[in-house]
Each structure stands twice: as structure tokens, then as C-alpha cells.
Amino acid sequence: MHRAARTLTAAIALATAFGITACGSSSGGGAAADEKQTLTVWAMGAEGEKLGDVAKEYQKAHPNVTVQVTPVGWDVAHQKLVSAAAAGTLPDVAQMGGSYLGEFAELGVLEPVDTQAFHKADFFPAGWEQGEVDGTAYGVPWYVDTRVLYYRTDLAQKAGVAKAPANWSDLQAAATGYQKKAGTKWGLYVQGNGLDTVQSFYPFLYSAGGEIVDKDGKAVLDSPASVRALKEYGSYFDKGLTKKSVQPGYDVLKDFNTGDVPMFFSGPWIMSILKEQYPQLDGKWAVGPVPSDKTSVSMAGGSSLVISKDSEHKAAAKEFIRYLTDAKGQADWYERTSDLPANTAAWKTGALAEDAGLQVFRKQMETAKVSPALPKWSEITSKVDAAIESVTQGKASAEDAAEKAQSEVEGLVK
């Protein structure tokens, strides 16, 4: 899920300008699921391009329902949703991630999930939590995402690394071994600065037991665990084990292919890219869980499907979402997109059950941590980006950077 480009303040301003209140309509009226009707759906990025084909299949079994899918680019998605919410013209169904949900739930434009039709126990905990705001579910998990460690197994042998690093000590030792014994230029790639550096930092932060904002809405970036994670992250830059900065659009896979970068953290789509674009690396790489400190915890990403509170087609919308999120629909969606199923039953057969690499992602998802659904989360993480950069570029200690960011974040969560 891409970072929301604007904040709740902008959305409220637009809503006010249009004269729309934040209460919405929650009537149980509207068309029955099997009545002749058109269901409007917005989906983003690659998902938006692929969903139209699924909609055609759905319509064969539901001839009275026309599913009108509109692909929306991620670069304009947030503004388009904000404008539609303000004008009362949201689609019946929309794709949303955690960074959007807090904002639109607070605007009062989303229909709460029918928990009699969709059950929390069917999904990864982090997937369901992404759709919750203040204890109420507004989104049904569509697909999930997390980060694990990719590493070069052929170079690991030269580096004296027998298996995937299990903890922070192992990771440091492996990075050093790759560089000094295997002759790689770097030991590990983690992002040093720029937009969304925090996403590279999450596996360290969460594995140390740290957080940016805790479950009570309190900023805790200056906690001992968070500072410890920031120190550990910064140590790779201090020791010359990773690049201090890269150009926008940097493709780590090119350096992974040459061996300049033997380890990095990323998501499941990288597996497909490596197999398709770098066949010469076949048998020379593997994935492993996030190395642990207190425990092994990675970030949780992905998207949920929401229903507009003002929709006149809620029954049909619910049926379409059920089709997309049951075990069969999820397995089909994985085959079309390589998006990881949020419904755990989809992992019981086929490649999802048999592929060892995919199973690493499944295990990681069981403990993955979701970001809080806060309206100003984008602003909050930009402060963390700046704190990380100040450490990685040698401009501040972890303690000082955390203290500064803590003060800034406290002002955003009040």
C-alpha cells in the first residue's frame, strides 16, 4: 500500500467545502444482491488492471450484476478517494490499505464490516487488524504483504554462512563475512534516507519490541527498545556494511545479481521477478525470516476491500467481496497477481502450500505487525524517516534522533 499523499485535514476541508457531513447513511435499504444492478469498484495499481478479468468471471455466475471496475493509479488514488468522499460519490467497493482507513473511517463514509458474513478467524491477524479502526472493522482483508530476508546462498558458502541469519548477531556476522570473505561490495542493503525509509526500519523496530505509537495512541519512539533498534540499524552504516544513500529508483536486484549486495529485505513479488528476470541466479538465493532480537517480527502490508456507507448496492457489494476473499477466490487471485492471500485457508493447497519460500512468508505473516490506523500516520512516519536519516548519515546519535522525533510525533497524536 502506498503512503497517503495527504492527511485527514485535507479530507475534512474538502468535505466541508462540499457541504458533506461525516455521518453518512447507514440504511439497510438498497437493491437485493440478486437484483439487476451495476456495482462500481475502484482498485489501484496492478490490482486494478487485473480485477477486471475476475469481474468478468464473476458476472458469468451472477448475470444480473454488472461489475464496473475502474483501475486507479496509486499516484492519484488518495486524492481521487478524498474528492469522491467529499462529493458523496465513492464507488460501492474500493480497495484501501491501512494508511487510508483511519482517515476515511473518521470521515464516516465507510460501512462497517458485517462480521456475521466475514470472520476474523479466517484471516491472518495482521490482515484483519489492517481493516480495523478503534475496534470496528471497516475493511475485509483482500491480500497481505510482509518483508523477509533475501540472501545469496552461493556467496554465503564463501562467507562462512551456513544458513539464514537467525538473530541480529548472526545478521551482522553474515554481512561482515560476505564483505570480507566473499568479497562483496556491501554486506546488506537497508535504506538510509528518503521517502518511506521507515519501511526498511520496521523489521528492526518491531523485532526489538519497539513501536512508533503504542496501542493506547501514545508516542513511544524514545523507548529503550526503539532506541536500541535505531542504534542497530545505524551500525550497518557506521561500519560501512551498507550504502549510505542511493539514487531515486534504485533497483537492489541489479546489485543482488552482480553480488555487490548479497542480502536485503523485501516482499513476495521479488521471488517472481528473480525467477523471471534473473534465471541465472536459480539455486543461488533463498529467503529467511526476519532475524530476531526480542523476537522475529516484520511489517504487515496489503489491502482491504471497503463498502461505501452511501452505497445502494451493499448486498451485491458484500457478495462480490465474499467471492474475492474466500479460499477459492484468494487462491485464484494469487495465481493472477502473486499477491499473498489474506485468507489462511487458501494456503492449504497448491504452490502456496508446497513452495518453501512462500512458506517463509506465511510464517512471517503470523507475527507481522500492522501500523496504527491513525489519520496523520503519513506525517508521523515522515518524522521517523527524518530521524533514521539523521542517524544513518552520522548527523545525530540514536538517542538524540529518537528524542527529537518523539517530540514531533507527540504533537501529531494529541
Image: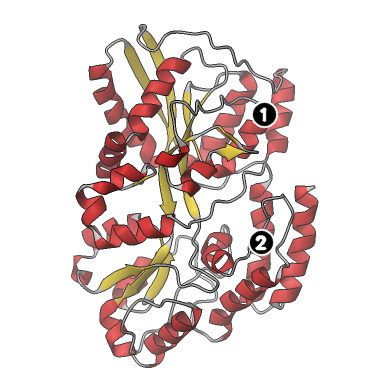
Q: Secondary structure at mark 1?
A: helix
Name the outermost residue toward the bottom: 181
Residue 278 coordinates in the image, percent (x, y): 23, 65
- Disc 1 residue crowd, few under 14, some 14–19, many 20+, Cα 10 Å: many
Q: Is residue 102 left or right of residue 75?
A: right
The quadrant where residue 179 appears:
bottom left
Q: Secondary structure at mark 2?
A: helix
Which three-letter amino acid code belongs to the residue tagged 1? Answer: Leu
Q: In the rendered structure, find residue 371 and report the number of the disc placed on it.
A: none
Query: Residue visible at 73% across and 67% down?
Result: 222
Instruction: Relative to 326, say whether 273 is above or below.
Output: below
Q: Earlier in the sequence, mark 1 or mark 2?
A: 1
Q: Which residue corresponds to mark 2?
A: 384
Q: Nearer the viewer, residue 22 or 316?
A: 316
Instruction: Relative to 182, say whether 50 is above or below.
Output: above
Q: Nearer the viewer, residue 321 or 396?
A: 321
Query: Residue visible at 74% across and 54% down?
Result: 218
Residue 189 coordinates in the image, percent (x, y): 45, 73
Color scheme of the displayed model: secondary structure
Instruction: Relative to 359, say whether 82 is above or below.
Output: above
Q: Nearer the viewer, residue 71 or 128?
A: 128
Query: Residue visible at 34% across and 85% down?
Result: 161
Q: Which residue corresponds to mark 1?
A: 107
Which three-letter amino acid code belongs to the residue tagged 2? Answer: Val
State how far apart marks 1 and 2 are (Cα): 26 Å
The quadrant where residue 19 appears:
top right
- Disc 2 residue crowd, few under 14, some 14–19, many 20+, Cα 10 Å: many
Residue 74 coordinates in the image, percent (x, y): 48, 41
